[in-house]
Amino acid sequence: MAFAVKFADFTIDYVTSLRHELRSNYTLDTFARRDGGLGPLRAPVPPRDISIAGKYFGDSAAALDSYFDNLKAKLYRTGRGKLYIKDNNRYVNAHISGYNDQDVAQELPGLCKPFAFQFTCDDPFEYDGQSQSELNQNVTSSPFDVACVNNGSFETPAQIEVKALGSDVTDIKIYNTTTGLYLRYSGTITAGATLTIDCADQSAILGGTDVLSLITGTLEIYLHPGSNNIRYEGPTTGIDLNVVYLERWL
């Protein structure tokens, strides 16, 4: 039985095996004259390696060579792309890191070439193909709470968008009251402009300008699995508040 794997907008057919390998970033420090050792309370999640293998069947040796020449050229030119390995619309961000094939002589009319691709996922998580968005328009109260539900199995970074409506908005705070973490933007969002705080990229952009220097607190506003509460505190002259996130699994 064979199945297909999609990388970026290319489909690799006739895959017969798929293997995941998740490395370990956990290190332990030991000390002389001390029992045991010291390790991090939470080790960072390491990269993921994915290998796929299969056999492609063609009408001739030339057809096999042509198929794999084109496939390798397309995949290696892509760079980082979305790798879909299941039928659940989830993907991982991956790079091609290796390839091998083998010429096999067979009786006509069929010729086949076994192949294998290796992918390295610098970002090890599987993501939902559809982002979640909790948009609240014309917020005129403070504090104002936004309920967000993360149906993934792992915490995920939030992107927070604050748009000033009729008046400028100065000095706002965003909390995840579920975790107790918060950030503060001490600058001004001019009327009609949108402040975008991306906790995945660790960035803060206002009208195309980097305003990260005006952020204090933490950009670790992550949504944990299950229910989360995101709170806005600031001027009540009217804003649009949007919390965007991708659910993810390990």
Image (spheres, rainbow, N blue to C red):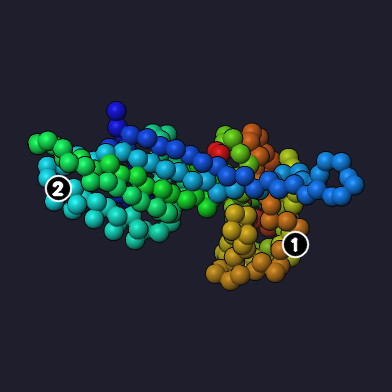
Amino acid type, mark 2: Ala
Above or below — where is 87 with respect to 121?
above
- Residue 185, given in percent of the width and then of the height, sits at 71, 62
- Residue 179, given in percent of the width and then of the height, sits at 74, 42
Packing grade of label 1 (10 A; few <14, some 14-19, many >=20) is: few
Q: Who's the residue at 48% across and 39% down the image?
A: 20
Occupied quadrant, residue 73: bottom left
- Looking at the rendered structure, the secondary structure element under dot 1 is strand
Q: Do we see residue 81 in this rendering? A: no
Farthest-out residue, bottom: 209
Q: Which residue is mark 2?
A: 61
Number of on-image labels: 2
Q: Which residue is mark 1?
A: 216
Q: Who's the residue at 76% across and 58% down the image?
A: 217
Amino acid type, mark 1: Thr
Packing grade of label 2 (10 A; few <14, some 14-19, many >=20) is: some
Farthest-out residue, right: 33
Is tag 2's residue or tag 1's residue first in the polypeptide sequence? 2
Using the image, tell me which numbered label, if any, was put on residue 20: none
- Residue 117, given in percent of the width and then of the height, sits at 37, 47
Q: Is residue 16 left or right of residue 88?
A: left
| Frontmost residue, 91 versus 26 | 26
State the quadrant of the N terminus. Answer: top left
| Frontmost residue, 88 versus 173 | 88
Farthest-out residue, left: 109
State the quadrant of the C terminus. Answer: top right
Q: Who's the residue at 56% across and 68% down the image?
A: 207
| Frontmost residue, 233 versus 45 | 45
- Looking at the rendered structure, the secondary structure element under dot 2 is helix
- Residue 96, given in percent of the width and then of the height, sits at 40, 53
